[in-house]
Image: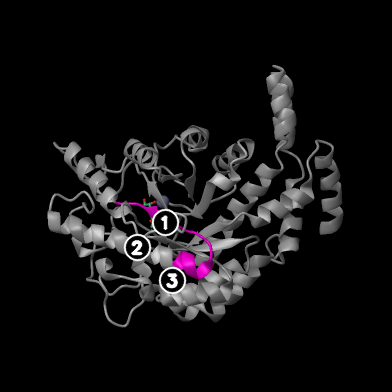
Amino acid sequence: MNIEKAYKTAKEQYAAFGIDTDAAIQKALKLPISLHCWQSDDVAGFETKPEGLSGGGIMATGNYPGRARNGEEARADIAKAMSLIPGKQRVNVHACYSETKKFVDRDEMDASCFKKWMDWAESQKICLDFNPTFFAHPKSQDGYTLSHQDDEIRAFWIRHGKACRRIAQAMAEAQGSPCYVNWWTPDGSKEVPVDCWGPRARMAASYDTIMNDKSIDRKKCVDFIESKLFGIGSESYVVSSAEFCSDYAISRKMGLCLDMGHFHPTETIDGKISSHLTFMDRILLHVSRPVRWDSDHVVIFNDDLKNIFLEIQRGKAWDRVVLALDFFDASINRIGAYVIGTRAARKGILCALLDPTKPLQKYEAAGKNAQRLAMMEEFKSMPFGAVWDMLCEKAGVPVGMAWVAEMEKYESKVQSGR
Ligand code: RNT
Ligand code: ZN
């Protein structure tokens, strides 16, 4: 199949609708997507910690061989995956991926615990994002952290939060680009509690204490708070619910993180984007794929995904949305998971950039709704694949399924020996 030839025809077809495919490819390659380090090792992390800790209601299922067991392996795997994915990438590190000779507890971490990640990021010419880890720790086992009723436990997690902002600031300074920090707490309970109010008041107060650190430059450490509907073990009550987080974010001028899997099973997040961005400066997206529940399946090129990016494109909001991935599938090759999920997200971006937004809006404004629907339907069978192939070609990554052979080679050479 001749990529150039197919692209030429596709380019003409899109141009007939006033769409510049070259410009769309260029822009799609530039928008950063933050790859989550936690797909590499099934959200286990690298700290030395007691066995059998609860994971805070999130769970990677499957036992496909080859999981990364340490920082070196995780970074090698992520680098391999990145070499097969087109476009600009960042890497999203969780605090539980700290690497130290001696155990350093969460409240005492500093940037030196992430030196290996930072040096690696520099060598890869990528930027890092950061996440405090409020789960998989002895002090989170009863399901509460920043909203805990015990002053000492709460103070421990507040110290962790403050430490994480300092780490993020150090990362931002080292990379000369902001570090996006996502705040997710598992706090909640299995049964409906009698007191739903106390934990929320304490959660807000804890966040206020963390965020009031004057030594942090909000242009360097850019914070987002992530809501959730439920988790395993927090089915009935989650402190940081959708309402709590959006109200907190709006009242504190902080960012909001929307995870695609954190709402009711048939509820999608595309429609929320224009609402939140009417009142907030920016949002962070955790691009994920829930299947019946918050299952964190590998992202695929489906309507839920396409619609998110379409909303951003139609609202001209690309510079107000931070894109990060959040999925963890332990049942398939993990490089494959990264490559499939990130390529799908990049495809979604390209697809949105090829939307005939202007003519559609013109039809809509004139009340020509049959014409509008006709054009939307027409675009479903436009030669998108030819433009995507050209994007991969231009980015210097394998076109089509050619990356699969690379994954297989890496699996037999590297992952199978683990
Ligand atoms: C959990 C949240 C959260 C985590 C990561 C590991 O439900 O989605 O974003 O997946 O922080
Ligand atoms: Zn998430």
- In the image, the segment drawn in magenta is 171-185
| Disc with the residue nearer the chain's start (1 vs 3) | 3
The residue labelled by disc 1 is 181
- Residue 74 lies left or right of residue 50; in this view the side is right
Residue flagged by tag 3: what amino acid is it? Arg
Disc 3 CB within 8 Å of nearest ligand 1 atom? no
- Mark 2, secondary structure of its residue: helix
For ligand 1, give the image quadrant: bottom left
The answer to whether 398 is drawn above or below residue 347 in the figure is below
* For the residues bearing labels 1 and 2, Cβ distance under 8 angstroms: yes
Q: Is residue 385 visible?
A: no
The percent coordinates of residue 7 (x first, y second) are 82, 52
Mark 1 or mark 3, whichever is nearer to me: 1
Task: Determine which residue is flagged by label 3.
Answer: 67
Disc 1 within 8 angstroms of ligand 1 (CB):
no
Please tell me which residue lies in front, 65 or 315.
315
Query: Which residue position holds label 2?
Result: 164
Based on the picture, tell me whether residue 116 belongs to the magenta stretch.
no
What distance separates the C-alpha of mark 1 from that of mark 3? 25 Å
Residue drawn at 52 percent across, 72 percent down: 121
Tell me the distance, in whole angstroms, between the alpha carbons under discs 2 and 3: 26 Å
x and y percent of residue 86 in the render? 65, 61
The quadrant in which residue 395 appears is: bottom right
**Residue type, label 1:** Val
If you read the primary sequence from the N terminus, does the residue marked by circle 2 or circle 3 appear first?
Answer: 3
- Amino acid type at image mark 2: Cys
